[in-house]
Image (cartoon, coloured by chain):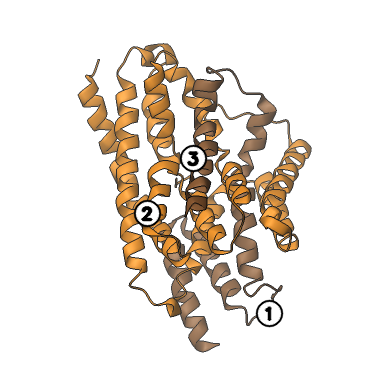
Chain colours: A orange, B brown
């Protein structure tokens, strides 16, 4: 059995290559938060304690458009719902840990930390993995991502202050979501979910309190489920495929 | 300012609750398969619901004309993402495309 220290460093090293992809996203978040007019303290606090990339992007944009707090929180909830799949997936591996460990690891449960941690856990059967110090691997991976997310968000915010508005850098938000959307629409039900949600979002864009976004997501989920129902018997993924961002 | 901090607190509450959900709150209970299936569609639905209005309603009104440079640049970025399977390249290409189109059109 590897020592906690060895596991921690292995987790840190496993996360390093992924930082090449997440750091630019952190910087784009910082730029968008700056352009949305958020104070530095609030922009950075969001990275420190919310620590969920795509919802931070959207929240910054919603702040800029003057959305109400309830809508921002509701939208954050909808966008981050996918983390429930990760929570379910790692739960058997952390069941034996103390509450303090569970709360700490759950805080660090992002797309990327999940991705490297679940591949470490799956090297052994669940029962065997519980006897190891693999939770230190989880901690090493999660803390590495968290620290780099703070640095890159802060750097992006400070950089954003130097860039003139004529560069239209607000468009990086749409581009980022296009880059994240394409890999998750690889089968017909997912494509239909995206089309339905996008159409409803456009039609409902004038709805009060930006509620059109939540309505669009619900319509998308409904369309995806219907398409899957017609297409083939439903299958359940025991280990969801994580996306390449927070 | 207090309003901003309250909103951040709310965001933390909902995000952390979701991450804690099965690990702590449900004590590792099995999730209903129907919920697992539904959650799979959250990423494509949410991302598309954010992107599409940004592209087709750049100034608030629906604009599907070739003069909509954001829509054109977005399509270019989508094609690059689809063909290269990369994430940062389409962002860079889309941004350059926007600048070029803004200068040309």
Name the quadrant containing residue A166. bottom left
Dot 3 and dot 2 within a common chain: no
Residue occupied by mark 2? A41
Q: Distance between the residues labelled 3 and 2?
A: 16 Å
Q: Quadrant of the C terminus of chain A?
A: top left
Disc 1 is placed on an element classified as loop
| Side of A153 where A212 appears, left or right | right
| Side of A2 where B49 appears, left or right | right
Image x and y of residue A197, in percent = 69, 53
Q: Earlier in the sequence, mark 3 or mark 1?
A: 3
Residue occupied by mark 3? B12
Query: Is A7 rendered above or below residue A161?
Result: above
Query: Is A219 rendered above or below residue B61?
Result: above
Circle 2 chain: A
Q: Nearer the viewer, mark 3 or mark 1?
A: 3
| Side of A202 where A138 appears, left or right | left
Residue occupied by mark 1? B65
The 10 Å Cα crowd at callout 1, few under 14, some 14 to 19, many 20 or more, is: few
Circle 1 chain: B
Residue, x 56% and y 48% (percent of image)? Answer: A184
């Amino acid at each position: 059995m590897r020592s906690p220290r060895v596991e921690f460093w292995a987790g840190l090293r496993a996360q390093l290559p992924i930082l090449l992809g997440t750091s630019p996203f952190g910087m784009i978040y910082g730029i968008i938060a700056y352009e949305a007019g958020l104070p530095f303290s609030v922009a950075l606090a969001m990275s420190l304690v919310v620590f969920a990339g795509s919802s931070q992007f959207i929240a910054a944009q919603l702040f800029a458009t003057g959305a109400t707090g309830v809508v921002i929180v509701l939208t954050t909830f909808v966008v981050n719902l996918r983390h429930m799949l990760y929570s379910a997936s790692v739960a058997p591996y952390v069941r034996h840990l103390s509450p303090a460990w569970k709360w700490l690891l759950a805080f660090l449960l992002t797309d990327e930390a999940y991705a490297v941690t679940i591949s470490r856990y799956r090297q052994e059967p669940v029962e065997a993995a519980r006897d190891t110090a693999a939770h230190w691997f989880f901690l090493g991976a999660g803390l590495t991502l968290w620290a780099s997310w703070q640095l890159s968000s802060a750097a992006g915010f400070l950089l954003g202050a130097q860039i003139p508005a004529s560069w239209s850098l607000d468009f990086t938000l749409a581009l980022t979501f296009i880059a994240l959307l394409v890999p998750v629409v690889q089968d017909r039900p997912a494509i239909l979910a995206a089309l339905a949600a996008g159409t409803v979002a456009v039609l409902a864009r004038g709805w009060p309190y930006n509620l059109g976004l939540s309505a669009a997501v619900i319509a998308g989920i409904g369309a995806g489920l219907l398409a899957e129902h017609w297409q083939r018997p439903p299958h359940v993924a025991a280990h969801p495929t994580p996306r390449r961002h927070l | 300012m207090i309003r901003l901090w309250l909103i951040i607190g709310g965001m933390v509450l909902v995000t952390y609750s979701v991450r804690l959900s099965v690990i702590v709150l449900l004590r590792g209970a099995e999730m209903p398969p129907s919920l697992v299936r539904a959650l799979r569609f959250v990423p494509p639905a949410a991302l598309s619901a954010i992107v599409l209005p940004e592209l087709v309603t750049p100034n608030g009104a629906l604009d599907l004309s070739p003069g909509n440079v954001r829509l054109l640049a977005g399509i270019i970025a989508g094609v690059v993402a689809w063909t290269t399977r990369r994430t940062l390249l389409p962002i860079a290409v889309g941004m350059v495309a926007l600048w070029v189109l803004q200068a040309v059109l």
